[in-house]
Amino acid sequence: MTEQILDVAELLFSQHGLYGVTLKDVANRVGVHHTLLNYYFTDKQTLFDAVIARRADVTSGLRMQALDEYEAASGGKPTVEGALHAFLDTDLDLYIQGGENWKNYGALGALASNTSYGAELMDRHFDPVVLRLIDLLKKAMPECAEEDIFWGYHFVTGALMLTLARTGRIDRLSGGLCQSDDYDAVKARMATFMAAGFRQICKPRGGRKAR
């Protein structure tokens, strides 16, 4: 029952956000009386937190492992593109392989990350793996100003969240040439595109260009 409740809540929250969904909405969709939800979750915010936490541990853990393995394989000489591939591709694979529930979670994360409360949850669940990426990027670009690396990550996460939102805008703009849920196409392009952006915005220290 708990997993069913979380799946339904995930879908509804991904469409309407925290404040556009009630416990009664979730209960009606599950097909139970809303008082039953209080047996599992004390209130709507507790339910929302549980929805975010359920898959956050999975994606954070897999990305942390991928970053660690990439650094070891790089022999202590990571590249910007390699670090971004480890971080982004591992996450995109979950949405490619995980089915509609994972895609709902991605859309929910995109929606939540643009609210103050959602941003707090992002901080709580994702800061360690993001800072692990930042550490690798610093090693890949030791001459780069630290603020430029953080701005670069800011732009990366913005593009990732827009992708996960699956708004359909790129479908309409491209006349169907591109599809907003074509994560394979995104995976083939995003890390390379973002790596070039990092190299362009980084202000060299000591006159050397970032790799």
Image: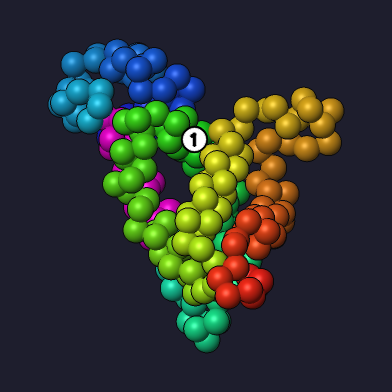
Q: Nearer the viewer, residue 201 or 3?
A: 201
Res. 192 image quadrant: bottom right
- Residue at point 35% right, 17% down? 19
Quarter of the rendering occupied by the C terminus: bottom right
Q: Nearer the viewer, residue 122 or 104?
A: 122
Answer left or right for 81 relative to 15: right
Percent x, y of residue 122: 36, 43
Q: In the figure, 162 relative to 14: above or below?
A: below
The residue lying furthest to the bottom in this view is: 75
Query: Which residue position is annotated with label 1?
Result: 110
Q: Which residues are magenta?
A: 47-62
- Residue at point 60% right, 43% down? 159
Q: Main secondary structure of the magenta part?
A: helix
- Residue at point 65% right, 46% down? 183
Tally of numbered tags: 1
Q: For mark 1, does the 10 Å Cα neighbourhood hold few (<14), some (14 to 19), or many (20 or more) residues?
A: many
Percent x, y of residue 156: 57, 49
How is colour applied across the structure in the image? rainbow
Q: Is 53 inside the magenta-drawn segment?
A: yes
Percent x, y of residue 26: 34, 19
**The disc labelled 1 sits on which kind of residue?**
Ala
Q: In the figure, 150 relative to 11: above or below?
A: below
Quarter of the rendering occupied by the N terminus: top left
Q: Secondary structure at mark 1?
A: helix
Percent x, y of residue 3: 33, 37
Q: Is 49 inside the magenta-drawn segment?
A: yes
